[in-house]
Image: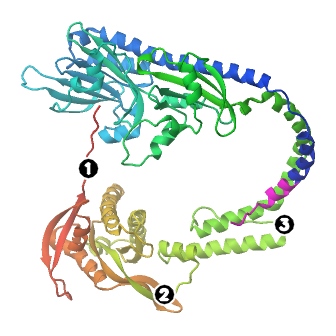
Amino acid sequence: MRVRLGYQLSITALFVAVVLTVGLALVFLSFDRARSITRSAALAFIDRVADHTADRVDGQFKDVLDILEVLRQLQPVETGAILDNPPFYAMLAALLRRHGQLYNLYVGYADGAFIELDVLDRAGPGFRAQLRAPTDAAFRLTVIEKPKDSASRIRFTYYLSPDLTVVAQEQREADYDPRERPWYRDAFLPGAGAITDPYVFKAANLIGYTVRVPFAQGRRGIAAGDILLADTDEFLRSQKLGASGVVFLFDDSGRVVAHPRMSEVLHARAADAPLDLPRLDQMTSIDIARPLNVWRQGGAAQQIFEAADGRTYVAAFRSIRTADPSGLRLAVMAPLDDFFAEIEAGRRRLVLLALGFVLAALPVVWWIGSLLSRSMKALAVETDRIQRFETGGPTREVRSVIREIDDLGQSVATTRTVVQTFASFVPKRLVQQLLATGDALRLGGSRREVTILFTDIEGFTNITEKADPEQVMIWTSRYLAVLSAVIMEYGGTVDKFVGDAVMAIWNAPADDPDHVAHACAAVLACREANRKLNAEFESQGWPTYRTRFGLHTGEAVVGTIGSSDRMAYTVLGATVNLAARLEPLNKDYGTEILVSDAVRQRVADRFAFRMVDAIQPKGFEATILVYELCGELQGRAEAET
């Protein structure tokens, strides 16, 4: 691989290299001080970080337990008045707002009743998307209860705005029983802790704990909440432990619960891999089994040990008191050489002497290099934009006092203008392909599968025959610009305009394996854009344009036809003829979008179609089935706690 350096950077780097080579050569010929000071400082620092982090995590669990203590003593919780109780819902929302790591609060009862309030955005955008929650919803409220007039439990789901106004609701027979969940069953076992083992919440794809408090007063049950550790991961990342130190949480079974790289590891797993917590050996390349066993057997919480990579490490361990039944532990670990502050301080003072001259002269050197390279950078940017076909926006002419650079700048500006003008008469994607490959435009073509679209405006002649020709051009150009933009947005190429009609191609000149679906989506989007444009036309006193569409897919000859001095990129063949015949048939059937059976067969699982007729177009021997494209099919997903 060829290494290239910028002109300005080369001049500056050469100057810095020469000066620093001489200066720093003197620095690294000096000393190696005693490591006892470094070891003591590292142990003291690690100890402070471990205490601070353990107290922070322990405090988070205590806060949640305090919230649950308040929750279980509320009268609606004890009596089980959970259905149609807005004041109770407001209290749940207030408790959730108090603690940012809770993404829900819920209560499960011994008779199978259940209430849960989720904060939608705390579980990430994927959770909201799974639920298809309204955009203005802030909470999801779920109530499972057996109404007086019902023989079975009913599940009521409400989506609430930030001020707890109901924005959507639904109900169905209950398919969830809290008594079957581990957080409920285990809570009544002898010695059960208030905090469950860590696990991955499938609905949110995040790691956390369930904190629970049982109650026997009134309607017996469990008050609980789920803690997400995403904020804890961020907090652990903020602990500065040199260049490679790390703070993480793990349990007694060796599973990592929180780690600065936890989100990276979870996102890197395969899509079909089971959701599970990573092991210690997956998150760290350093084997901490020996110092960890020493601590578990009553040894020192702060230790220095040698690792297999030849480096010396300092580590500290702590237990999270509130979560002790679930075996939650904290580890702080960093290489000892990250703490050579004393040695590096003396070395740094000597380095500063060498850097002093460099820093004093660097602005001048950089300024000189900037003057020489500014024009060259601008030319590189302009040529790159031309190559990527970004010719829009104001034209910037590059000028320089150096004659050769000034001449080159004028040539680039001329090239930009020529390319921009050329693109107005040739399909944009073809120009982009020519610029990307560097190939010349030649006569000839090749056979390939394409999807062809023809459009036309119904009654265009009657609309415009008495109108001012200049106004017709202005309004029709506006209409064609809207349709062209939508077609290109969905990967299509506008082949030509024939008056008010548009011919567009998919899968040429650029390959598009899903071209049939993209074409169908583009036609539906064109129809919608046409409707919006017609609303503007009506408000501005111009007649509306009702567009008819014909769509067909099949093999055709795609390429360049014409003569050596005038060429046109287009597509020829029976596929084009059939697409052109479909468009005017809309008038006979009272439809807007007609497609062939070939289109329907390719995307029947993604779009809705209606059978219209079986026809035999002029020039075709076979009977063609014709369908109306009605719309895109929609899916549905739902998440459970």
Can you identify the residue that label 2 sits on?
567
Dividing the picture into quadrants, the one containing residue 527 is bottom left
**SS class of the residue under badge 3?**
loop
Q: Earlier in the sequence, mark 3 or mark 2?
A: 3
Residue at the spot x=43%, y=86% of the render? 445
Please give the range of residues in magenta: 1-14
Of residues 496 and 633, the one drawn nearer to the viewer in this rendering: 633
Distance of mark 3 from mark 1, alpha carbons? 63 Å
Q: Earlier in the sequence, mark 3 or mark 1?
A: 3
**What's the residue type where badge 2 is placed?**
Met
Q: Is residue 627 visible?
A: yes
Asked if 604 appears above or below 430 in the picture, the reply is above
**What's the residue type where badge 1 is placed?**
Gly
In the picture, the quarter occupied by the N terminus is: bottom right
At which x and y percent is residue 242?
69, 32
**SS class of the residue under badge 2?**
strand
Residue 633 falls left or right of residue 232: left
Distance of mark 2 from mark 1, alpha carbons? 46 Å
Label disc, if present, on residue 129 of the rendered structure: none
Q: Is residue 12 magenta?
A: yes
Dividing the picture into quadrants, the one containing residue 247 is top right
Can you identify the residue that label 1 sits on?
635
Asked if 522 appears above or below 102 in the picture, the reply is below
Tag nearer the camera, 3 or 1 = 1
